[in-house]
């Protein structure tokens, strides 16, 4: 599925962050071009956040492609903007990593709120080992996790420990983000690594139509072996 970190100009992209934010965030059609290219290559969804025109672009895809799946993450500010994601038909909503990693009552309350809206609740984690361990030990109402996962071990804390944690917990669904480590890993290498682990889906940040087509095809070929 299409990741939206480049669209918001996330900090891990360094000097490109501001360029991509300016290019995408408030330009619906530019984002839709990427989403369509990903879809045409076999990618059937988006991992959205309610920022700029991202939800509008996601809604256009859902209205024009009946098998398009929207997942999303809450906004990390005081208002999590859950309603915006529900309005565009999000099937799975992750509590944002900036909130989830605090492992406190706000996380519990957001999971309950998402669940109460008949949407599958999930947890995104920027500190995955600590946050996943907390969720497992406390039997939180969650079965899906969005975690950084890449062959370079970037953003993963202890790579080997996280691999073991993921692979041992077969009753949960793990979705990989930061899979290309902010563009530092070639797609073939990235997704061959991921295919060896208990990862069911990936979010890929893409900034051109050609990149979307190529990266999506490589990911599907690797993950569907």
Image (cartoon, rainbow, N blue to C red):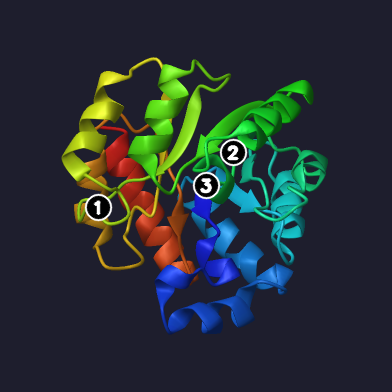
Report x, y in % for residue 87.
82, 42
Return the disc, 1 or 2, that comes first in the chain's sequence.
2
Near-viewer residue (125 or 25): 125
Q: Which residue is mark 3?
A: 97
C-alpha separation, residue under disc 1 versus residue under disc 2: 23 Å
Q: Position of residue 5 (x, y in %)?
A: 52, 62
**Residue 58 or residue 63, whichever sits in front:** 58
Pointer 1 and pointer 3: residues touching (CB < 8 Å)? no
Q: Quadrant of residue 94?
A: top right
Q: Which residue is mark 2?
A: 94
| Residue depicted at x 41% and y 18% | 137
Name the spot of residue 130 as percent of width and height, x first.
37, 37
First reached walking from the N terminus: tag 1 or tag 3: 3
Does the image show residue 91?
A: no
Report how far apart the C-alphas of labels 1 and 3 lie in the structure: 22 Å
Q: Dot 3, crowdedness within 10 Å: few (<14), some or many (≥20)?
A: many
Q: Residue at x 23, y 52 (%)?
A: 153
CB atoms of marks 2 and 3 within 8 Å: no
User: Seen in the image, is 9 located left or right of residue 152?
Assistant: right
Q: CA distance from mark 2 to mark 3?
A: 8 Å
Determine whether 112 is above or below 126 in the image.
above
Residue on which disc 1 sits: 190
Crowdedness of circle 1 by 10 Å Cα count: few (<14), some, many (20+)?
Answer: many
Q: Secondary structure at mark 3?
A: helix
Mark nearest the camera among 1 and 3 is 3
Q: Residue at x 65, y 53 (%)?
A: 76
Q: Secondary structure at mark 1?
A: helix
Mark linked to residue 106: none
Name the residue: 54% across, 40% down.
100
Q: Give 102 or 222, whichever is nearer the viewer.
A: 102
Query: Which mark is in front, 1 or 2?
Result: 2
Label 2: state its secondary structure. Answer: strand
């Amino acid at each position: 599925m299409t990741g939206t970190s480049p669209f918001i100009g996330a900090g891990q992209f360094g000097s490109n962050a501001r360029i991509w934010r300016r290019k995408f965030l408030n330009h619906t059609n530019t984002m839709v071009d990427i989403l369509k290219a990903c879809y045409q290559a076999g990618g059937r969804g988006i991992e959205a956040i309610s920022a700029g025109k991202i939800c509008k672009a996601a809604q256009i895809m859902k209205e024009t492609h009946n098998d398009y799946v929207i997942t999303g993450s809450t906004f990390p500010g005081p208002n999590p903007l859950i309603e915006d994601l529900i309005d565009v038909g999000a099937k799975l909503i992750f509590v944002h990593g900036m909130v989830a990693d605090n492992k406190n009552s706000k996380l519990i309350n957001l999971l309950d709120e998402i669940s109460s809206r008949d949407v599958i609740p999930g947890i995104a984690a920027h500190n995955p080992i600590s946050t996943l361990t907390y969720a497992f030990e406390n039997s939180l109402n969650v079965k899906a996790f969005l975690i950084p996962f890449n062959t370079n071990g970037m953003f993963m804390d202890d790579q080997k420990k996280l691999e073991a944690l993921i692979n041992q917990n077969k009753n949960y669904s793990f979705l990989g983000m930061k899979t290309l480590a902010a563009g530092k890993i070639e797609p073939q290498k990235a997704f061959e690594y991921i295919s060896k682990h208990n990862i069911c889906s990936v979010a890929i940040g893409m900034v051109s139509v050609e990149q979307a087509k190529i990266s999506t095809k490589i990911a599907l070929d690797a993950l569907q072996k």
